[in-house]
Image (cartoon, rainbow, N blue to C red):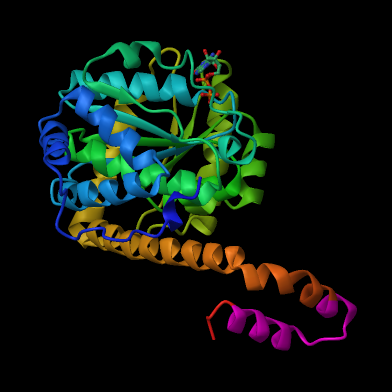
Amino acid sequence: MKRATDPLPGATASGPASPADQELLAGVLSGQPRALAKAITLVESTRVDHRRRAQGLLQALLSHAGAAIRIGISGAPGVGKSTFIEAAGLHAIEAGHRVAVLAVDPSSALTGGSILGDKTRMEQLARNPRAFIRPSPSGGALGGVAAATRECLLVCEAAGFDVIVVETVGVGQSETAVAAMTDIFVLLQLPNAGDDLQAMKKGIVELTDLIVINKADLDARAAQRAREHFESALPLVANRTAGWIPPVLVASALKREGIVEFWNEIGRFREAMRASGAFERRRREQAVGWMWEIIQNALRDSFGSNPDVRRELPALEHAVRDGTMAATVAAQRLLALAGLS
Ligand code: GDP
């Protein structure tokens, strides 16, 4: 998938051009499921003409987006993410919310396969008319998958979903991508210490605003020990959100225990961040970060696909590896060939 880096000749800054796209926009804004599905297919498409239309649509949707709470959720396969998201999602729907669940599946980017396994998950939530579940866009680099998900998130918000969950699975890079598009990042853990250490090692805990020890019903004492372990370690390593020490909750998604406490903590986080101005600040920084990511991807792509660069690259790389050419000389030559210096 090459979407984030496509050239967009003629993309407008003002919104959709054709009457059909204006109708699509109106359909999304009034929350019509078919319009939502169509808009998302459009923003996930890699075709250049689709990208252009998607940009017009997104620009028009932007002023209607932003009202949701954006929650990132990660954890190893089997920890209970889909069970937890279903329980939390149904609870939010009962309280009057509309819930969209999106996914960033790094395995779909790497292999075309799926760790998050999209078929039979969250059946109850999937059937609920106030929920929308979208599997991970597939193919291409993680950057492209994440960019598509980010655009889906905006479309869902404009369509009136006020709770957005973005799910991913424990391989560092995808967590970083999801943390960069969400307000609060939640890590699910099992009640055993081996698992805790893994997350610590991978640096994921540093991104985390809230930890949930799931499956506490299997071993309540182990869950309590894991909680204490994280509570003592977190203040030292978690640094995503200044002025916020990530709380650690114990839950059983299967028995729907700990779900109320989860939403209480999400609410407490949002209030604290709003009061300090950090909430809006984070979103603005994320938007700027996203812009730079798109630029960097586009530069890398245009460099890599330049025919002169492709012709010269093997020999120059070889010369640098052999020590017969200085890295700076080779880099300058290649950048000049790509018209970048
Ligand atoms: P995911 O891979 O992280 O999405 O995990 P799933 O939600 O698919 O759950 C994996 C397995 O763990 C399933 O068999 C669930 O029924 C089970 N599971 C999920 N949450 C709990 C829990 O709180 N307690 C127990 N005992 N099992 C759970």
Q: Is residue 336 covered in magenta?
A: yes
Which quadrant would residue 170 be assigned to in this image?
A: top right
Which one is nearer the viewer's eye here, 250 or 296? Answer: 296
Residue 144 at x, y percent in the picture: 48, 48
Which one is nearer the viewer's eye here, 322 or 50? Answer: 50
Q: Does residue 75 appear in the picture of this structure?
A: yes
Q: Is residue 185 left or right of residue 29?
A: right
Q: Is residue 110 above or below residue 13?
A: above
Q: Is residue 29 covered in magenta?
A: no
Q: Does residue 66 appear in the picture of this structure?
A: no
Q: Is residue 92 above or below residue 68?
A: above
Residue sitting at x 59%, y 53%? 203
Residue 131 at x, y percent in the picture: 27, 22
Q: Is residue 191 left or right of residue 66?
A: right
Q: Is residue 222 left or right of residue 90?
A: right
Q: Magenta residues: mostly which secondary structure?
A: helix
Which quadrant would residue 41 be assigned to in this image?
A: top left
Q: Is residue 297 left or right of residue 102?
A: right
Residue 264 at x, y percent in the picture: 27, 34
Residue sitting at x 34%, y 11%? 124
The image shows a total of numbered marks equal to: 0
Residue 154 at x, y percent in the picture: 26, 44
Q: Which residues are magenta?
A: 319-337
Quarter occupied by the C terminus: bottom right
Residue sitting at x 74%, y 83%? 327
